[in-house]
Every structure is written in C-alpha cells, then in structure tokens.
Image: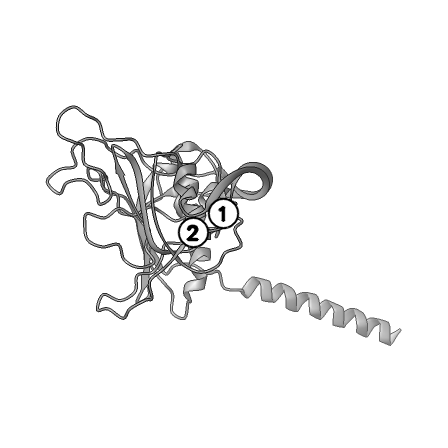
Amino acid sequence: MVQTVAMKLWALLLLCGAAFGQQTAAKVEFEVASIKPAAPMQMGMMRAGVNADAGMVRYTNLALRDLIRTAYRVKDFQVEGPDWISNTRFDITAKLPDGASKDQIPEMLQALLVERFGLQVHRDSKEQAVYALVVGKGGPKLKPAEAETNDKAGPVKPPAPGGPVQLRDGGPVPRNAMMMAMGPEGAHLRAPAATLAGIADMLSRFTERPVLDMTGIQGQYDFDFAFAPETMRGLPPMPRGPMGPGGPPPGAAERPQGDVPAERAGTIFDAVQQYGLKLEPRKAPLEMIVVDHIEKTPTEN
C-alpha cells in the first residue's frame, strides 16, 4: 500500500514538473518591431530582401506571402491563401532579444505575424502537378561557378530558396545573388553561383507549376537565362516601356530603332535545355501552409 501511494505521488510530481516546464518555456519573440507599408515600386525596378545583423533583422519590400513562407520555412508555392497576399508588401524592422540566434528568427516572425496580422494557418499535404528539373539525354552542360575571391565588398548572402527576386540598376551581379530583369523580350535571370535547387525554386515563380530539383547534382554553377515567363506567381506586375533616365535594368534588351519590336525570348523549357536540363511534367505530394485568416492591415506599432 505504501509503495503504491509513493508511486502515485512520484507520478504526480512528474506531471506537475512537465506542466511547470511548459508554462515557463519562454516564447520566442522579437523585442520590438516596426511594420510599414513598402514604398511604391520604381519604374522597372524592384528591390526586396532580408538582412540580419547587429541584433536587427530587416525585411524590405516583402509581400505577405514571402513573409509567411519565410516564417514557416517553406517555398513560395507551398503557401496557399488569398490572392492579395502576393501583392501587399511591407517593410519590417525588428530587434532580436539578447541571446537569440538567427536560427530562431523564423519562429519570431511567426509570432509577429500572428500578433500583428492575426495570422491563422494549418498544414496540409496535397498531390500537385509539378515540373521536375532533370538531366537531359545528353547529360548536363553546366559551367561551375568561379572560385570565391576576398574582394573588399565581401561575399553577398544568397537569397533563401524561393526568395524574392531582386533587380539592379547596373553593375556586376554579386556572387551568390540572383538578379532578375524584365524587358520587352521577356525575363533575364542572372545567377553567377547558384545551386540547381535554388534555380528550381526561382523558376517556380515563372511557371504554371512548381519546379522541383530532381537532378541529384550538387554544387554551385553559373547560369544566365532568358525566357518568356508562363506566369508571374508571387511577383508584382513589372512595368513595360521607358525605364527612365537610368535606362532598362541589366539584361533587358533595348528596343531597336523604329517600330520593330524586340525579339521575344524562347520558352522556359528552351532556356534550361542549353544547360543539358529539361522540365518534365509530373505529380508529387507537397506540404502546404494554408492561410485560414489574415488581416490586410497590421495593428499599430
């Protein structure tokens, strides 16, 4: 009898200890955060990205879809929600709490979206039509990325897989960056040091189906694509016509003199073939983050 009572008391203490641990577990949140609507896009130019340093993290000109994707560590095509989350953009500046690591930032962003936008989501798995990026019959024709140099500018952190497109107004493309320009001929994607997985994620923004890397090839390679997008998923419409005093973005073909239009680029299927790759239509199960509720306007800072 005494032994039975002792065992019950011990079990009760264990349950109390577990409950206490759950109650005292610290919730990972930004110390303070400022959210503002992003400035209107300049003619022919879009700058977007994420930067974390010196205890601060900055999300610049990111759509709510990108913020959700980043917060839940998924790719753009794995976020399902209302269409407007792809076009409603914000600038966020947040301070990390003392002792926090960069690995905890996505969870802090989750908490911020829940608190300020009332975000509610659930996870689901769906079989979807995809494009598999695979090696063609003739084998890969990939150009290895140039060796990294210790220049004064320092290395540029690559965008997260499936991350936002960044356009530049001139100059060389930094190593590990992906730069996109839009012109009358179509899209021009420049990536001096990208993985096949990164290329697949980026191409997913310009195809009707998500692109999954199934090449099995590792390493970084030099890519230069020109193609006519099937669609522009997750991106705002890019203005056409005159680009202003700075001229068109790099890689955008200039319209010839007279009324002759610029020659239209080939399809995205043609673009990958130059590297001995191809896109095959397939079916594959994908984990999805489904947005059940989100407000268009965040609560005040």
In the displayed orientation, state which residue is furthest to the right: 1
Q: 6 and 297: which one is in front?
A: 297
Image quadrant where one finds the N terminus:
bottom right
Q: Are marks 1 and 2 in contact (CB under 8 Å)?
A: yes
Q: Give how far across and how far down residue 17 sits, in percent.
A: 65, 69
As drawn, 243 above or below 66: above
Question: Which residue is painted at 70% across and 70% down in the image?
Answer: 13
> Which residue does the numbered mark 2 point to in the structure image?
141
Q: How is the image coloured?
A: one colour
Mark 1 lies on a secondary structure that is loop
Q: Amino acid at mark 2?
A: Lys
Residue 214 in view (yes/no):
yes
The 10 Å Cα crowd at callout 1, few under 14, some 14 to 19, many 20 or more, is few
Closer to the camera, 221 or 187?
221
What residue appears at the point 39 percent right and 41 percent down from the top-left corner? Answer: 271
Q: Residue 68, image x and y in percent?
A: 44, 46
Q: Residue 229 in the image: state x and y as whole percent.
A: 37, 34
Could you tell me the amino acid type at mark 1?
A: Gly
Q: Is residue 117 visible?
A: no
Q: Is 257 on the left or on the right of 211, as rendered?
A: left
- Asked if residue 7 lies left or right of residue 116, the reply is right
